[in-house]
Amino acid sequence: MDNRYIHLGVGVSGIRSYSLGICKCFTSTCLVNSKYRELHKIYVASHVDYVIRKFIDNLDILKNPFHTYRSRDRTYYVYKYSDKLWSLLKQIFMFAEFIHSNKKLRYRKREIVENVLSKCRDVDRCIDSIIDTVNRLEFEIRKRRERGKKALLSRFENNNKKCLHIIKKYFSDLENTPTFKVSGIGFAECFEDTTKILRKMFPDDVASRYANSICAGGNSIYLFARDSIIAIDARYSNHDVKIFCDSCIDTPGYAMVKLVGVSMINGYVDRVDWIAVLGYDKHSNQIFLHYVPKTLVFRDAEVCRRWIMGLADNYGNTDSDVEIIEV
Amino acid sequence: MSSPETIKKKVYRQGDVILEQVEISQHDLDLYAKLESNKLEIRSENGHSHVMNSIKLYRYHIGQVVVVEKPTPLVHEQHPTLIIEPGVYRIRFVRDWLLRESRPYD
């Protein structure tokens, strides 16, 4: 006879995680005495609370535990072990995490969970219902992402066309930028190669800062500008990188373009790697390039310029009670 | 939305240097700030300097602040001169985004 027990530790929303484990005893001794412990234990974060609670409250098999106890901010429900129940609980935990991992699903969690529960006539059907729902939602997410990638590409391509005249007039280097390939795999090699190149353009501390910035995890082509524009290719995987001009400004004092560096997969935008503002100061006859947060991806060049001046936050919200006087 | 009566905060930019108007009373400056100089000189990467004379440069907890008592020119060889109106200004520089750490580098 199987004398194992499933301990379902119900946490507190936002405070205590949920746990699920198998144990040889049904009391709280299981938690403190290693002799009784089994290796298998799963935790999910406390903020997935809603989904798990809904299953506990609605499934008959979970409503009548063999034993309950409280320990360290968790209420433990103990059930006699069965393969089916163990599979069901594992699926519920996975399902809760899956729903929480996607913002759009989080907003629909009530409807999704109720739909699954309506098909839970027995354990087998309940497991099938969860698996089918996860598959269907994953398909929806994939489709939505593909549509988003397509739309993003169209936006970048259209905006790029609108700004071509400014690029040609002020930043002709951009069309034929010298690119230096550095080792993108090891940090030390990448840092050494990048610093060597950037030291020709910037003081040592600035060169080191930039090298540090792109070598630790950067997997893209990055632009740098001083008297001219150069590109450093720090990719460690074989994917396409494209640089689009998403917005531009031309004023009596300066011309500026917002550049977006993106990784492409199958001809579509897969990931935005970086966003930068490339400008030309007409008074000092100098070009400059500053990176800005990726959260400004849908903001125009003027908002990015304000971010650089510290007058906009990372989401592009600007202070309207400011009078900018500049040269 | 700002009403027509609202006095807008002045922000001056000359190249990489930004002077942002702040509200600090002379009393607070006397108590908590340290007077560093009567001249502002900020050297650029290209060797030229942003210069302002006849001002008071203080070290305050938010960084360096400049007290301008009469309209004073901010001069740089490569940029047109900016006339700074009387007021208290915090000195800042244009910032960059640190790609690796996902935070601004001020």
Image (spheres, coloured by chain):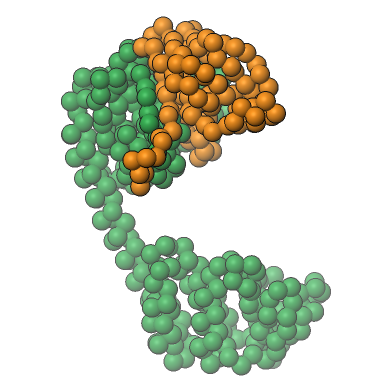
Residue positioned 59% across, 18% down in the render = B57
Depicted A56 relative to depicted A263: above or below: below
A218 w.r.t. A75: above or below: above
Q: Which residue is at a point 33% across and 40% down the rendered structure image?
A: B4
Q: Could you tell whether B68 is left or right of A149 in the image?
A: right
Res A300 quadrant in image = top left
* Residue at image coords 64%, 23%: B59
Quadrant assignment for the N terminus of chain A: bottom right
Question: In the drawing, does residue A100 fall left or right of residue A150?
Answer: right
Q: Which chain is orange?
A: B
Of A120 and A260, the residue lying toward us: A260
Residue A172 lies left or right of residue A65; in this view the side is left
Q: Quadrant of residue A87?
A: bottom right
In this rendering, does residue A236 appear at all? Answer: no
Return the x and y of residue A32 as percentages of the image width and height: 80, 73
Residue B80, image x, y percentages? 36, 12
Q: Residue furthest front?
A: B5
Place of residue A279 in the rendered image (x, y in percent of width and height, measured from the top left): 33, 23
Q: Residue at x 76, y 84 (%)?
A: A27
Image colour for chain A is green
Position of the C terminus of chain A, as image quadrant, is top left
Residue A30 seen from this side: yes
Q: Nearer the viewer, residue A249 or A137?
A: A249
